[in-house]
Image (cartoon, helix red, strand yellow):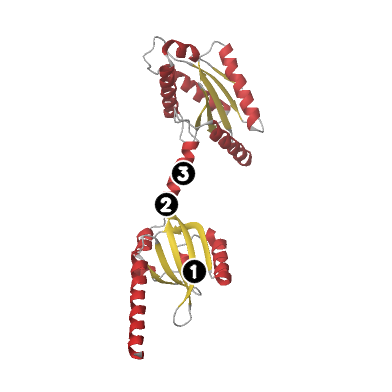
Amino acid sequence: MKFDSTIDSELRLQRSEEKFNMLFEYSPVGMALVDHETGQFIEVNRSLLSSTGYTKDEFMNLTYWDITPREYEAQEMQQIADLNEKGVFGPNEKEYIRKDGTRYPIRIRGFILKDVDDRKIVWGIIEDISELKQLEEELRLQAMRDHLTGAYNRRFFMETLNQTIKQAKRTKKDLAVIIFDIDHFKEVNDEFGHGKGDEILVEITKTVQKSIRDSDVLCRWGGEEFMILLPDTCLTNGVLVAEKLRTNINQVELNLPRRISCSFGVTDSKADDAETILHRVDSLMYKAKQNGRNCVAYS
């Protein structure tokens, strides 16, 4: 009976190991067994190989330092400390380096195991969170966009303007800000309806976006009013951009009995803060309106 019991225990252990090996190998989440002392990989599953682009033979010659960017060294040291003290770490977020040198974001947690020789092994569970991070970025950008025109909103513009002012001070470079709004927009809305007004806002946004650099930031400030941030741009060049936009907007075909025009204000970074810049450029736009509209005022 004792012999039969021993065989039964061995069979159960064998089946348990087979089940673990299958779950490990075919898990949709990356998994790895790592020597706690050397950092050498002992075993990896298909999911982790697929994410990193390595073959299994190649991976077996790596340590976790080979796939971990050096800026995460402090985090790695804390993970090792947590393993030594608690036997677990994470979940933590960082990046891994693929075979082709590109990076991808992961969420990782680890547990200490011991093999038959009492050697400490780290069982790492590594989740590729690229899609999650992409979705988060898309949602972040959507929250920074005007829903009608797709231009950035006021919140994003202010954050970017403050950052650009700080950078300009450090690098001793220029920046310019343009504000413009659509002349007689209320009359157009009243005469042709808000649907036509929305079409005008969308078409003008498209025209402006085609006329400025990728590094420039177009914002729908509110209603028919827009702002543009021009990094590394002096006042003279900012005025040239505004004149170009004025001309291009005049040529937009909107199937109306009259052309659409805009009044522009342009200033540079003489002021030390965003609020002062915005106040001055807003005053310049109203000066352009007083000068007959469809023109550019600058200072």
- Answer with mark 3 or mark 2, whichever residue precedes in sequence: 2
Q: What is the distance, in whole Å, between disc 3 and disc 1 at their CAs?
A: 31 Å
Q: Position of residue 61 (x, y in %)?
A: 40, 71
Residue that protrudes farthest toward the front in the picture: 1
90 above or below 147?
Answer: below
- Answer with mark 2 or mark 1, whichever residue precedes in sequence: 1
Q: Which mark is residue 130?
A: 2
How crowded pointer 2 is (Cα within 10 Å; few <14, some 14-19, many 20+) is rated as some
Amino acid type assigned to the residue bearing label 1 in the image: Phe
64 above or below 183?
Answer: below
Element marked by disc 2: helix
Element marked by disc 3: helix
Question: Is residue 270 visible from the viewing direction of this image?
Answer: no
Amino acid type assigned to the residue bearing label 3 in the image: Glu
Element marked by disc 1: strand
At 56% from the left and 34% from the top, the residue drawn is 155
Q: Which mark is residue 111?
A: 1
Q: Viewed as shown, does residue 178 lie left or right of 28?
A: right
Q: Position of residue 241 (x, y in %)?
A: 50, 25
Q: What is the distance, in whole Å, between disc 3 and disc 2 at their CAs?
A: 11 Å
Amino acid type assigned to the residue bearing label 2 in the image: Ser
